């Protein structure tokens, strides 16, 4: 069943027609692709917070029901399990790009470059056992700050461990497609009961450093796998949708 779409527009402050139509199309596409998704409502924060408001005005459109500016609200979008709805921060999304393939490609280029360096390091290590560990020889110079930023800690780092970083970097990319797929991924997880999947739970236990919780781990992995098939960990989680 198709959800109710409710987006309120006011002057030129919020989301554009193009953005709203893009979200609607993406939701329809994913509900067809993953038929166990159940969504009752897709809306903006204004329509969520001010359901009983008859007439929109400047103050209500820019402030939530607690009087806080939407521009100061941390969340760009939210998924609610109980109500089965997705809501978008109409103020913070105003002007945001629909897609950004170049940002994803930049992350994948860094991934490929590091994998090439890693392969060479293994060869050098086999020739000379005294070569410093990979994380000391390479990661300290460039990628360690990012690993520390996301609190990604492993006793030793291999390329599959680095998948956590690539997923987290994609998660920080700000464009409508990524944001919408992330929230839809929560609905996919609920519809396909992925939180109770033993393999997903096992993967989370192994890679959970760097993720907020199991729900976010699943959503971020599915989101990353939908945007690229080049991240093994993300693909493993997506493969559990059945």
Image: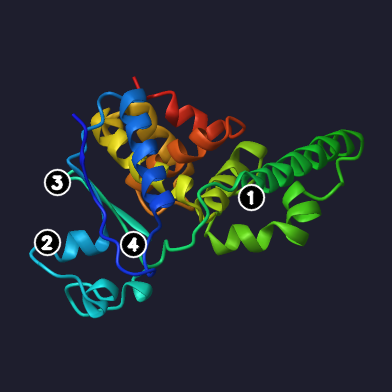
Can residue 77 be seen here? The reply is: yes
Residue underneath mark 4: 89
Residue underneath mark 3: 82
For marks 4 and 2 on the same chain, the one whose residue lies earlier in the sequence: 2
Of labels 1 and 3, the one closer to you: 1
Say which quadrant the C terminus sits in.
Answer: top left
For marks 1 and 4 on the same chain, the one whose residue lies earlier in the sequence: 4
Q: Position of residue 56 (x, y in %)?
A: 19, 70
Out of 102 and 56, give the one closest to the viewer: 56
Do the residues under discs 1 and 3 have CB atoms within 8 angstroms?
Answer: no
Q: Hey, which quadrant is residue 122 in on the image? A: top right
Residue at the far left: name it.
52
The crowding category of the residue bearing disc 3, from other C-alpha atoms within 10 Å (few below 14, some 14 to 19, many at least 20), is: few
Res. 51 mark: 2
Of labels 2 and 3, the one closer to you: 2
Residue underneath mark 1: 103
Residue at the far right: name it.
127
For marks 3 and 4 on the same chain, the one whose residue lies earlier in the sequence: 3
Do the residues under discs 3 and 4 have CB atoms within 8 angstroms?
Answer: no
For marks 2 and 1 on the same chain, the one whose residue lies earlier in the sequence: 2
Q: Secondary structure at mark 2?
A: loop
Say which quadrant the N terminus sits in.
Answer: top left
Q: Position of residue 231 (x, y in %)?
A: 59, 34
């Amino acid at each position: 069943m198709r959800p109710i779409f409710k987006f309120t527009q006011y002057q030129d402050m919020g989301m554009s027609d193009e953005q709203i139509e893009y979200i609607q199309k993406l939701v329809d596409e994913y509900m067809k692709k993953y038929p166990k998704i159940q969504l009752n409502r897709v809306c903006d924060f204004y329509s969520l917070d001010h359901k009983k408001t008859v007439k929109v005005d400047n103050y209500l459109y820019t402030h939530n029901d607690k009087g806080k500016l939407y521009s100061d609200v941390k969340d760009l979008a939210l998924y609610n399990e109980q109500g089965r709805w997705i809501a978008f921060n109409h103020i913070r999304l105003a002007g945001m790009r629909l897609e950004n393939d170049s940002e994803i490609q930049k992350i994948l280029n860094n991934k490929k470059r590091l994998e090439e360096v890693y392969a060479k390091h293994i060869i050098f290590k086999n020739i000379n056992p005294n070569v410093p560990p990979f994380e000391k020889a390479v990661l300290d110079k460039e990628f360690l700050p990012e690993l520390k930023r996301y609190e990604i800690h492993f006793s030793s780092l291999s390329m599959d461990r680095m998948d956590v970083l690539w997923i987290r970097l994609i998660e920080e990319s700000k464009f409508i497609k990524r944001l919408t797929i992330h929230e839809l991924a929560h609905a996919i997880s609920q519809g396909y009961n992925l939180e109770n999947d033993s393999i997903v739970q096992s993967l989370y236990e192994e890679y959970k450093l760097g993720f907020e919780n199991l729900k976010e781990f699943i959503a971020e992995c599915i989101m990353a796998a939908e945007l690229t098939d080049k991240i093994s960990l993300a693909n493993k989680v997506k493969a559990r949708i059945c």
